[in-house]
Image (cartoon, coloured by chain):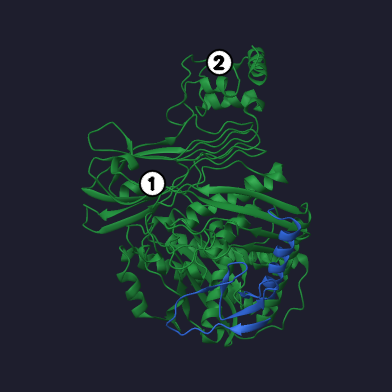
Chain colours: A green, B blue
Amino acid sequence: MTGTPPPMAGIDRVGLTLLYKRVRNICDEMAFAMMRTAYSPIFSEGLDFSTLVLDRRGRLIATAGINPAMLGASLYAATWIIREVGPENFADGDVFVHNDPYRGGSHLPEHMMVAPIYHDGELAAFVGNIAHLAEIGGMAPGSFAATATDIFQEGLRIPPTKLFDRGEPVRDIWRIMLANHRTPDNSWGDLHAMLGSLRVGERRVGGLIAERGIEGLNEAFEQILDYAEAYMRSEIAGLPDGIYTGEDCMEDDGVSDRSYWIRSRIIIEGDELIFDYSRSDEQAIGPINAPYVVTLSASLNGLLYVLARDVPVNAGIVRPIKVVAPAGTITCVRLPGPCVGGQTEFQPRIMELVLGQILSQILPERAAAASGNTSLNFLFGGTDPRNGEYYAHYHFEGMGWGGRATSDGNSAQIVPHANCRNTPVEIFETKWPWVHEEYRLNDDTGGAGRNRGGLGVRRVMEVAGDVITVSALSERMKRSPWGLFGGRDGSRTALEVAPAGSETYETFQEAFGLVSPSKFANIRLRRGDRVRITSPSGGGYGDPLERDPAKVLADVELGFVSRASAESVYGVVIAGGSATGDSGQDGSGSGDGAAGDAAVDEAATAELRRVMRDGVA
Amino acid sequence: MAWHDLDKSWHDTTVDYCDVCGNLLIARYWSFVEPVGGETRRCCDESCERLFHRLRRIEESAPGS
């Protein structure tokens, strides 16, 4: 590109907004390119990736708002690659890759690519992306080894490494990577989807440079960062100074039955805020530890759910914020500690600790009760009997979100820190040897409250191949998702199995003598065995006896709440309709809990609620 | 209180962490000596030294908070 215009001397607010939106749109276009060209459903269906535009120093300017769980890595990973490699060692056409969780990655499956953009031989900006490869080797298919005791069991670790050198593939690196993945064809396709996304970004950012020049564009980027910083500072300054604390725990680490506690305090002083996790437990033996950027992501996401909702998410937002997560604690894993579950289980735990337990002390109207708070990772792999090829997949399950001040929690959603989507039944059955028997909302489980927790789901599927190897990494089997301000707790996770020909389900822990009910690796199931996955529901917000009786009636009509629970939990008496008291069994709203001319009996409800509150009949 | 290069050979793939915040140290680090105890700390930059003193001040004014 030639004919560079003179540098811009600054942009007004409208111009800056338009430019930022354009950069955001570039990120979105990069994301669509990745989604449309990927081989693996975790890209094309799950959307487990992020796309980034960065300035010439590697600072994040914009990201597609797809996966907030990658925010910490988005903020730092590229900067660290550039620092470690040295900007003088980049060249036009280079692409670097890395997945090192000790260097800014979130966990091994998530690979980051970064490419420099040059203009007339001068470094102008970077584009990057982060994406979860479904299979990268290690001790368990799907590379989510829930019983790993070091990083080397979790897959192939790649420090910042040149994948393309001046536009040419570095074949030795490609061969090493593909030789260590169980499904190299998928990796090949997905890595090229990432490359394609970078090419889209390069073209679009190149267009911006042609319009505005390198200096002009980077000056505008600086203004965007300053704006985000000022926005965050003004929001933090609006909070009362003080020290606010909370704690929650990881139930176990898959290796022992011990819980690990996360202790957080938020220190607000003027327009600055510190997240301090230094009193948390030491790092776990099993893979529930968090790399630094995961703790950073969780903290920022918890904050961004209640503050500065329109802030441009970029490197400016962290200037007034410090995260203290000492190395060697569960909040900042040290080499060679395993950490694949940190991103999916630890991150939501911290995020909701910040959002629901700590910030609710000063912003109760913006807080939420706990969601099911697990990604409920279910992994499997084997040889496809239809073609003899090896397959592997990483599936995460939807669950219920917590009730909040203004509404009920969503049902059947992926945990709130990641806007991912689950794997559709049709994909399961066309790509892998599973047949579904049931997939439905798990009725009557949402934590009761003035605003109810969302419902989890129940999935039952049968193995349709000779052998399939499954693993799982989840939480919320021993401790329920908590309610808030008098709301009831949500329901728990369950992972069960019934051998072929049996109608009796046992937990995987009972059936296979496992240490943990929620974390296991490499269980071999056989044709006809069935797996039942029950995801947790969200906690309720506020006293259930304050819930609008009309909403309770609607819940009964939709099959979300049984008639019995309407009375015993919500104190709502429903007259007319079906007398069975059953909720719907298919989650489709066809439940017979209040079919027909059902209505709230206002007088009986008022009396029942009085008795339930006062305890006097 | 000074900047230091983080000298690592090309075949050393380990990483180093900030003694104050836990973040990654890359290429160079800022060091300072603790006023109490005299221990030398390696950290990200001057802002982490200020953070160290800030946390200590908070701890002294509100122990256990």
Q: In the picture, which quadrant includes the N terminus of chain A?
A: bottom right
Asked whether the viewer can see residue A417, the reply is no
Q: Which mark is residue A506?
A: none
Residue drawn at the location 38% of the way across and 46% of the way down: A516
Label 1 – label 2 distance at C-alpha: 48 Å
Q: Nearer the viewer, residue A257 or A310?
A: A257
Residue drawn at the location 40% of the way across and 70% of the way down: A157
Locate residue A294, reporting x and y percent.
54, 60
Name the chain letter of the residue that bears numbered label 1: A
Q: Nearer the viewer, residue A3 or A612?
A: A612
Which amino acid type is marked by label 2? Asp
The answer to whether residue A284 is left or right of residue A571 is: left
Locate residue A601, reporting x and y percent.
62, 14
| Kind of element beneath mark 2 | loop
State which quadrant residue A210 falls in: bottom right
In this picture, is B25 found above or below A429? below
The answer to whether residue A14 is left or right of residue A116 is: right
Residue drawn at the location 55% of the way across and 27% of the way down: A555
